[in-house]
Image (cartoon, grey):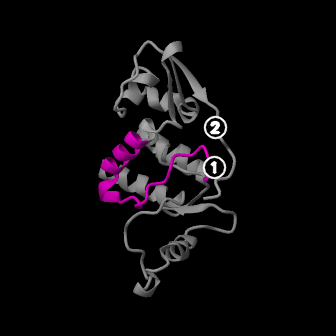
Amino acid sequence: MKKSLEIAALFLVACGCAVRVAPPSVSADVSAAPDKAWTKVLSRFVDDKGRIDFAGMAKDPHDLENKVIRPIGDPRVHVVLNCMARGCPRLPREPFRADMLDPELEACAQYFFNEERNVQLEPNKQTVRLSQILQFYTNDFLKKAPSLIAFVNKYREAKIPEGWKVEFIPYDWQLNSQ
């Protein structure tokens, strides 16, 4: 499990999420500009084709997600990975730490599934509208719960009745300018 968390933390770094570990060979005087420090460190792992050097193998972000992270089997990664589109999960204010990844993923899942832009209830129609992320990765979520509603309810404060109809909120692919 520890190795899986380390791999997941590396993937989150590769996707631009960063990890709260002091970057190697970055002096203390760059602490005022941590983004520049991380860019300097991470740029050593990206080749001229945009692939990431992952344990000596060049991988593009699609391969890292689908051949390294998803096989680990933790669908919570889908509520933290961010491609900078408006429909993406919000990035936490603090970067992820490898040794704290499980509770951090838990907190992110709780935030995601309690945020109205990702879960919208329509009681008069007995319908819940979920982020389209759950449609994109339905099989991943269903490996951990018998239904999407059951998975979402693990993290929601106000539970959704299991018999409700599920619809999906169209994903907003516009680039997030923030």
Which span is picked out in magenta? 84-111
Dots 1, 2 in contact, CB < 8 A: yes
- Residue at left 46%, top 80%? 32
Q: How many numbered dots are placed on residues in this image?
A: 2
Quadrant housing residue 158 = top left
**Callout 1 amino acid:** Ala
Q: Which residue is mark 1?
A: 85
Q: Which residue is mark 2?
A: 171
- Callout 2 crowding tier (Cα within 10 Å): few <14, some 14–19, many ≥20: some
Q: Could you tell whether 82 is left or right of 94 in the image?
A: right
Q: Whole-percent x and y of residue 140?
A: 48, 32
> Quadrant of residue 93 in the image?
bottom left
Which SS class for mark 1? loop
The residues tagged by marks 1 and 2 sit, at their Cα atoms, a distance apart of: 9 Å
- Above or below residue 17? Residue 116 is above
Is residue 166 inside the magenta stretch?
Answer: no
Q: Quadrant of the C terminus?
A: bottom right
Q: Residue at x 65, y 41 (%)?
A: 172
Q: Reply yes or no: does residue 105 show up in magenta.
A: yes
Q: Is residue 83 above or below residue 27?
A: above
Which of the two labelled residues, at mark 1 and mark 2, occupies the earlier sequence position?
Answer: 1
